[in-house]
Image (cartoon, helix red, strand yellow):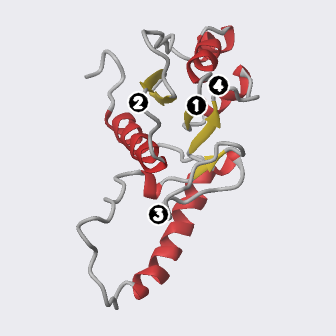
Amino acid sequence: MERWPRRKVVYAAGSGLVGAFAGCSSLQTDSKPSDTEEQTFKRLDRTAVYVADGIGFTIPPEVETVSRPQDAELLVLPGDTNADTRQAVEWLTDDRTLALWGDDAEATWLTWMKSREFANAFENGGYLDSEGDPRLVVGGTVGQWVIPYRYQWESEPSDRDVFRTLDGSLVDLQNETPPGRG
């Protein structure tokens, strides 16, 4: 039997109550969505998200944010975060997805992944060093493997584009199969 972390149980229970009350308000509407309105997210609108101070994103209204990292399923941190390797490993082993945003995102990710703590906790190296510097690095676990994704844009992306990318990463991680089992 799979054990759910306490935050997932609390989140699921709270979502059910909010959904029951919110459902009533959706029965009456005077307007239809326009063709220009943004698409909803596939996974991000059902994920508790922590966005660190100083990131500066305008968060879409359908994204549920939490004020403490320990309550989040997705943590969005600055690329030059103060979180150390031990903390990153703890978050990842607790089935949280990490996103690093900014110029130092890849350097921080590589520092974490090359550590002894990481090697002791996971089956793979989680490396993604390649040409170009990504503005966004997202990593999550699939079994005992860490799967990293890196993203770069030719020009500054809109906040909505970044959140769409985060949503796509969550969907990809959900659909991943651990190496050797697919």
Q: Nearer the viewer, mark 2 or mark 4?
A: 2
Query: Percent x, y for residue 150?
Result: 44, 24
The residue at which mark 4 appears reads as 89
Q: Residues within 10 Å of mark 1 (few under 14, many from 20)?
A: many
Q: What amino acid is labelled 1 in the image?
A: Leu
Q: Nearer the viewer, mark 2 or mark 1?
A: 2
Sooner in the amino-acid sequence: mark 2 or mark 1: 1
Sooner in the amino-acid sequence: mark 3 or mark 2: 3
Q: What amino acid is labelled 3 in the image?
A: Glu
Marks 2 and 1, how far apart in space? 15 Å
The dot on residue 100 is 1
At x 39%, y 34%, the residue is 173
Sooner in the amino-acid sequence: mark 3 or mark 1: 3
The residue at which mark 2 appears reads as 153
Q: What amino acid is labelled 4 in the image?
A: Val
The dot on residue 62 is 3
CB of mark 2 within 8 Å of CB of mark 4? no
Marks 4 and 1, how far apart in space? 14 Å
Callout 1: helix, strand or loop?
strand
At x 63%, y 47%, the residue is 56
At x 54%, y 66%, the residue is 13
Marks 3 and 1, how far apart in space? 21 Å
Q: Is 2 situated above or below 24?
A: above
CB of mark 2 within 8 Å of CB of mark 1? no
Q: Along the horizontal axis of the image, is 105 left or right of 36?
A: right
Query: Percent x, y for residue 34?
Result: 26, 72
Res 98 quadrant in image: top right
Marks 4 and 3, how far apart in space? 29 Å
